[in-house]
Amino acid sequence: MDIVKFITLPSTFGRHQKLQWFYLSMCNILTSLHLVASVFISASVDFRCAIPGLDNDTYAIQDGEHEDLIKQYILVDPKANSYNSCYLIQPGGGNSSNAVRCNSYVYDRSQFAETTTTQFNLVCGNNVLSTTANIIYMAGLFVGSLAFGSVSDFFGRKWTVYVGLVIQGAIALGVMFSPNYIVFTVLRFVLGAVTIGGLIAQFTLMVEICPPDKRTMAAVCQTMVWCTGVMLLSGLAFALRHWRYLQLCIACLSAPFVLLYWWLLEESPSWLLAKGRYDDAVKILNRVKKVNGLDVDIDSLSYGQDEKVEDDETETSCGTTCLSLTRAKTLLWNIIINSFAWFVASMGYYGLALNVGNLVGDLYINNFIGGLVEVPAYILLLGTVRLGRKYFYIALMSIGGVALVVSAFLIVYVTDKGLNWVIITVSMVGKFAVSAGFELVYFWSVEMYPTSQRNSLMGVNSAMARVGSMISPAIADIPKFVTNVAFAKGIAPLIFGVLMIATSITALLLPETVKFPIPETIEEANKFTYNSKGYQPFRHAGSEDLSEDTKEMKALST
């Protein structure tokens, strides 16, 4: 029997792979804490200028005398019934013509004891720095997506996951001690890079250890753990209320992973085989055999080493990089279309789901609900096991795109507040769809790419997603810059909706991958076309008919 087929047979999946899935899923909690933490760490709060000479000034009114001082020095916007936060009335002035810009502020501490906004005074003329910090963090995700993909393909999935966890914990601790804005921003850039790099390696390793019929369940359940991390973040932020304490708590949560995971995680047998490390792969598969109680002689499994060496030499002569990929036209088009899908999904997801600070209501509750509502979206993906990835994705993005386009016109032209529930419901359909679509395109892409370049190509896709996430805040803020256009408030959902419909159309050119073995080489991956029904793995020397292998392995089930 061929060892590649042995890895992908459903009957080999047992306790060993389930434990590996559990270990990798726990990493997702840590990853979600890091990626969503900025919602609380950099949260904006109400503020005003500090009253000159009053050392114990606070945002909250202390008594009648304090209220009189506020009225004397602080301008009030009568339309918004709030403070003009950046200007101070000069003594004896009494009106806006005598107001000057202040450089000292007091903040509303009712919700947060301290955030980076209050710590580094990122308000008024410096408010652009807060946005810049978030863009630089997203740029870190972009760089990490590209760099760590190649690192994982060269050094291995396990090594990348573990080293990423070590660096992640160290940098997260450094962020907590940041003395100023520049240090904070630079460290967050590095933290973003290692966090997304580790996430890609984790997901790739999870897919590679699961047979085709188990990948969807494994991926969906792993994403449920992500939602758990988002909801946990709300509880931690609510309990701690200070950005440094929250950052310290998240950094300390890395400790058990750093101490245990080098010994708990196993390398991907598929990656080892792709690198020609047959003996190392056999050692891991013997442990799989022992833990899962399989009755098979791993050492007797064939691999077709001569043919594999020939395949490897062919790929190496092509460069195993851009040169070899450009010769695989079908695979190249799949990469381009997938990159566009990732770009749109990330833009929509971050633009619609992660901007909870601008929602009405309590920030902690809003973030918790934001994590909770993603759960049914991901459960829905279990339907792809029967219906397939391709048409399920097309349906999600089409419905979600149409919903967002409709919501754009409802936002602008429906003025009856009694119909607000209609606007919210239609908008939530779009959010629901883009959340499910983002997760679906993630493991759909994994199944299209060859093992030898899988993590590198996933890195390219993830980099495009990061570009989308960097652009999404600018699109969401269009009404701030286009004030003289009646349709301004509808532009953002209209853009998101149109792009979602566009990606559902381009997805028609992608192949179906559900229940098919993941490709090992570029040549195998190039057999995946939009109208193909998968591919048959290459027959290595000594391999038998796949159907016969399947019959033989029924006896090995635990």
Image (cartoon, rainbow, N blue to C red):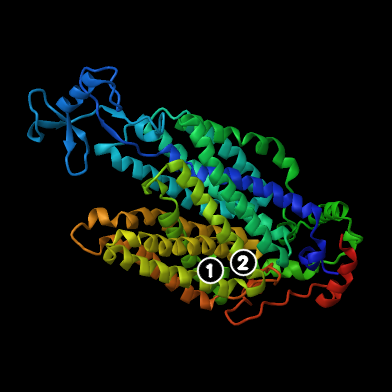
Question: With 125 as the anchor, is 42 left or right in this view?
Answer: right
In the image, residue 125 sits, relative to residue 223, either above or below, namely above
The C terminus lies in quadrant: bottom right
In the image, residue 109 sits, relative to residue 486, either above or below, namely above
Question: With 87 as the anchor, is 428 left or right in this view?
Answer: right
Which residue corresponds to mark 2? 449
Which residue corresponds to mark 1? 335
Among the two numbered marks 2 and 1 on one chain, the one whose residue lies closer to the N terminus:
1
Mark 2 and mark 1: Cα distance apart in space? 9 Å
The image shows residue 446 at horizontal and vertical percentages of 61, 63
The image shows residue 304 at horizontal and vertical percentages of 80, 69
How many numbered circles are shown?
A: 2
Q: Say whether marks 2 and 1 touch (CB < 8 Å).
A: yes
Q: Secondary structure at mark 2?
A: loop
The image shows residue 181 at horizontal and vertical percentages of 37, 34
Q: Residue at x 85, y 67 (%)?
A: 302
Q: Secondary structure at mark 1?
A: helix
Q: Residue at x 48, y 33 (%)?
A: 175
Q: Residues within 10 Å of mark 2 (few under 14, many from 20)?
A: many
In the image, residue 7 sits, relative to residue 102, either above or below, namely below
Occupied quadrant, residue 121: top left
In this view of the protein, which residue sits in the foreground, 398 or 159? Answer: 398
Q: Residue at x 32, y 30 (%)?
A: 107
Q: Residue at x 40, y 30 (%)?
A: 114
The N terminus lies in quadrant: bottom right
In this view of the protein, which residue sits in the foreground, 61 or 202? Answer: 61
